[in-house]
Image (cartoon, rainbow, N blue to C red):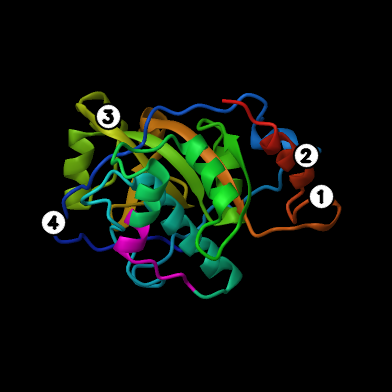
Amino acid sequence: MVLMTGYNQPPPPEHPAGKYGRLPGHVPNGLRDLTWYVAGSLPVAPSEVEPPAPGKLGNWAMLGNDQYGDCGVAGIAHGEMCVADDVKRAQLNLTDQQAVQYYLTYTGGQDNGVVLADFLAYVKKTTWFTRQLGAYAPVSVTDLATLRFVINAYGYAYTGIQVTDLMEQAFSNGAPWTSAMFTQGTVQGGHCVPLVGYDETHLYCVTWGRVQAILYPGWNAIAEEAWATIWDEVPAGGLDNHGVNLKALNSDLKLLTR
């Protein structure tokens, strides 16, 4: 991804928040943190990674998240857009209808949200349209160095957060999320967002059709889970280009119990 020289997004017209659909998460028995699958240390990520500029990847789109609690699906779709841009392949250009159908197929037609770990297992098993999720692993939400590595190396981090009414208002006004908006607000629901960039003061996620800035203390307040997702990689010798042992990781993924 491209190093930042400062990410400035003009204040958007008032844009209401969408729906929620992330259910309380868990890490399956036998699946370890991403850092366990590396001999030694992960490569150090650059100090800044710029989120895709407005319009670079086309319209982020709501992908149905204004009508359905399909944020888990929208989070995968928006994250995979960043992956496609990184590896210079054509965008899938999913429609809202395609995203909603994928969601309702997974839920059996019920708009009842997803558990991120369980949904990732489904995506890996069934494929994501024409893409293949090669592997996934949890990342500690407090391990900023590894989160930064994941964003830089794999295009995004797939995360679960809590959102309050004050955060909804800030989103509508184009303001960053802060810790006070969480501690002084009322939780509205669990939400899934991909982190797609960062700098010295902010993380940047995509939600409800656009990029949203999060101050680091705000992230510490709202974050509940994070995942590395590794797409389309079949490395020789079991290691990917960053030293992650995909052979060992996939061996653990095959043995998961809930």
Q: Position of residue 26 (x, y in %)?
A: 50, 26
Earlier-in-chain disc, 1 versus 2: 1
Q: How far apart are marks 4 and 3 (CA)?
A: 21 Å
Q: Which mark sits nearer the N-terminus, 3 or 1?
A: 3
Amino acid type shown at disc 4: Glu
Q: Is mark 4 on a helix, strand or loop?
A: loop
Could you tell me if residue 175 is visible in this image?
yes
46 and 240: which is toward the camera: 240
* Residue at image mark 4: 14
Q: Does the magenta stretch include residue 95?
A: yes
Q: Mark 2 points at which residue?
A: 248
Give residue 160's position: percent from left, percent from top.
41, 37
The answer to whether mark 3 and mark 1 are in CB contact below 8 A is no
Q: Decide which of tag 2 and tag 4 comes sooner along the chain.
A: 4
Give how far apart the Cα atoms at labels 1 and 2 are: 8 Å
Give whichever of discs 3 and 2 has the lower sequence position. Answer: 3
**Magenta range:** 91-100
In the picture, the disc for residue 182 is: 3
Task: Give the left or right position of residue 226, taking residue 214 as reference.
Answer: right
Q: How far apart are marks 1 and 4 (CA)?
A: 48 Å
Q: Is residue 28 left or right of residue 236?
A: left
**Front-most of 120 and 195?**
120
How much space separates mark 3 and mark 2, taking CA atoms?
Answer: 38 Å
Task: Measuring from the top left, give residue 28's x and y in whole percent.
Answer: 58, 27
Tag 1 and tag 2, C-beta contact below 8 Å: yes
Comparing labels 2 and 4, the label whose residue is closer to the camera: 2
Tag on residue 238?
A: 1
With 46 as the anchor, is 213 left or right in this view?
left
Q: In the depicted view, which residue is nearer to us: 238 or 8?
A: 238
Q: Is residue 86 left or right of residue 92?
A: right
